[in-house]
Amino acid sequence: MHRLLALYPPPTDPAAFRAYYEANHLPLAARMPGLRGFRWGFDVAAPGGDTPYFCVFEADFDDAGALDAALASPEGEATAADVPNYATGGAVLLRYDVHEGTPAPPGR
């Protein structure tokens, strides 16, 4: 699995960001071809301190090629073009292969 991670610094108007993001941007992102699933959260917090981010978004694809195809599609281009409409602080995009581990049993 390959993941796209978007990190959003605090916007000028958090309430407007939330409203636009959920009503307009997420429906655009949901149409990207090859998308396996996505999730997001607001009010991002860091343990023990301040965080430079307000919102986080994760989108999963089968592999890097599927993500590349999604970003190059008309739906992906429309999603990218929409970012300036709500993200006054911009966005940081990261991508990576996802690996899974198994939690250690209690007491180890």
Image (cartoon, grey):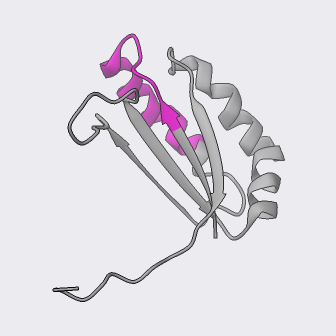
Q: Is residue 3 above or below residue 29?
A: below
Quadrant placement of the N terminus:
bottom right
For image coordinates 33% across by 20% down, the residue present is 14
| Residue farthest top in this picture | 12
Q: Is residue 10 magenta?
A: yes
Q: Overall secondary structure of the magenta stretch? A: helix
Tally of numbered discs: 0
Q: Residue at x 35, y 13 (%)?
A: 13
> Is 107 in front, or is 74?
107
Quadrant containing the C terminus is bottom left
Classify 56 as above or below 34.
above
Residues 70 and 94: in front is 94
Q: Residue at x 70, y 63 (%)?
A: 34
Residue at the front extreme of this rendering: 108
Instruction: Please give left or right for residue 45 compared with residue 84 in the image.
Output: left
Q: Position of residue 40 (x, y in %)?
A: 41, 47
Q: Which residue is most to the left? A: 107
In magenta, the rendered stretch is 7-28
- Against 95, residue 25 (above or below) is above
Q: Hey, which quadrant is residue 42 in on the image?
A: top left
- Magenta-span inclusion, residue 13: yes
x and y percentages locating residue 37 in the rendered image: 53, 63
Task: Give coordinates of residue 81: x percent, y percent.
Answer: 70, 27
Residue 20 percent coordinates (x, y): 44, 26
Q: In the visual, does 96 lie left or right of 102?
A: right
Residue drawn 18% across the image and 86% down it: 106
